[in-house]
C-alpha cells in the first residue's frame, strides 16, 4: 500500500513539474514613425517566473529620440477595461541619431548557416558607423522580402578599410534573403513580470518622437508552465 501511494505521489509530482516555454508574441514587424501598435495578448496565469524579451532596431538615418514600449498586465481573463502598465522602456532615448556616422546599413548577400555576410558592391562606399564603437555588438539583419525572417546577430569583426564583409559569431538561423539589409543600431531589454497575473501584452509606441525614424520590433515571452 505504501509503495502504491509513493508511486502515485511520484506520478503527480512529475505532472506538476514546471516546463520551460517560449512563445513569440510579436514577430519582427516594421513600425512607421508616429504609429502605435497593440501587441498580442497572452494568458500567463499558469506561468511562473515569466520574462518579456524586447528588441528595437532603428532602420533609417532620421533623427530619432525614442520609441516607448509599455508592458501591460491584466488581472482579468478577458476584456480591455483593466489593463495596467507594469513597466515602460524607452529605446534610443539616450542618443540623437541623425547621420550615417551613427546609423549604417548595407545590402548583404546571405547564405543560411553562413557566418560571413558579404557586402554587395552596390552598397559601397559604406561607412562602418556604430560597428566601430565597441567591437563585439548586436546587429540586425532585415529579412527580405519577408520581415519575419529577420534576426539578431552578434558581430565578431568586419573587413578593414572598404566595407566588403562582416563576420558574425553564429551562422544564420533563418534565410533572411539574398539581398537583405544589415543595420547597426539595436537596443534590447529583458523585463521581468510579476509572479501572479493573468494576461500580458506590449504596446509599441513609435509616436514618442512624432517625426522620428521607422523602426523594427520583436517581442517574445519565456517562463515555466505547468501545462
Image (cartoon, rainbow, N blue to C red):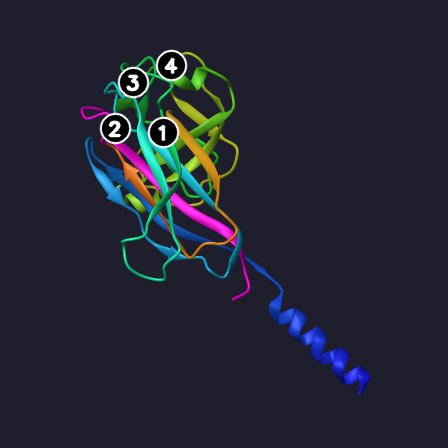
Residue 145 makes an appearance in the image: no
Q: Which residue is mark 2?
A: 208
The tag earlier along the polypeptide, 3 or 1, is 1
Q: Are marks 4 and 3 in contact (CB under 8 Å)?
A: yes
Is residue 148 toward the left or the right of residue 86 in the image? left
Q: Which residues are magenta?
A: 207-227
> Residue at point 35% right, 39% down?
70
Determine which of the numbered discs, if any, sits on residue 187 in the image.
none
Q: Which residue is mark 1?
A: 90
Q: Nearer the viewer, residue 178 or 209?
A: 209
**Picture coordinates of residue 21 (x, y %)?**
51, 56
Determine which of the numbered discs, if any, sits on residue 124 in the image.
3
> Residue at point 26% right, 20% down?
61
The tag earlier along the polypeptide, 1 or 4, is 1
Spot the residue most to the bottom.
1
Is residue 134 toward the left or the right of residue 200 in the image? right
Q: Secondary structure at mark 2?
A: loop
Q: Secondary structure at mark 1?
A: strand
Q: Which residue is mark 4?
A: 162
200 in magenta: no
Label 4 to label 3, Cα distance in Å? 8 Å
The quadrant in which residue 14 appears is: bottom right
User: Which numbered disc, 3 or 1, marks the residue closer to the eye?
Assistant: 1
Amino acid at each position: 500500500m505504501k509503495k502504491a501511494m509513493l508511486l502515485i505521489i511520484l506520478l503527480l509530482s512529475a505532472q506538476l513539474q514546471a516546463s520551460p516555454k517560449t512563445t513569440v508574441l510579436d514577430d519582427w514587424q516594421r513600425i512607421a514613425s508616429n504609429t502605435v501598435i497593440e501587441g498580442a495578448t497572452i494568458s500567463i496565469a499558469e506561468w511562473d517566473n515569466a520574462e518579456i524579451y524586447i528588441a528595437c532596431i532603428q532602420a533609417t538615418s532620421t533623427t530619432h529620440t525614442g520609441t516607448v514600449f509599455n508592458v501591460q498586465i491584466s488581472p482579468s481573463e478577458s476584456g480591455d477595461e483593466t489593463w495596467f502598465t507594469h513597466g515602460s522602456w524607452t529605446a534610443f532615448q539616450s542618443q540623437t541619431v541623425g547621420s550615417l556616422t551613427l546609423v549604417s546599413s548595407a545590402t548583404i548577400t546571405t547564405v543560411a548557416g553562413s557566418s560571413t555576410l558579404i557586402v554587395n558592391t552596390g552598397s559601397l562606399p559604406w561607412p562602418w558607423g556604430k560597428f566601430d564603437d565597441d567591437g563585439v555588438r548586436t546587429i540586425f539583419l532585415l529579412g527580405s522580402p519577408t520581415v519575419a525572417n529577420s534576426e539578431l546577430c552578434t558581430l565578431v569583426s568586419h573587413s578593414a578599410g572598404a566595407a566588403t564583409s562582416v563576420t558574425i559569431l553564429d551562422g544564420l538561423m533563418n534565410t533572411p534573403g539574398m539581398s537583405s539589409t544589415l543595420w547597426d543600431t539595436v537596443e534590447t531589454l529583458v523585463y521581468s513580470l510579476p509572479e501572479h497575473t493573468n494576461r500580458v501584452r506590449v504596446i509599441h509606441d513609435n509616436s514618442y518622437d512624432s517625426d522620428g525614424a521607422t523602426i523594427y520590433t520583436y517581442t517574445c515571452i519565456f517562463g515555466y508552465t505547468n501545462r
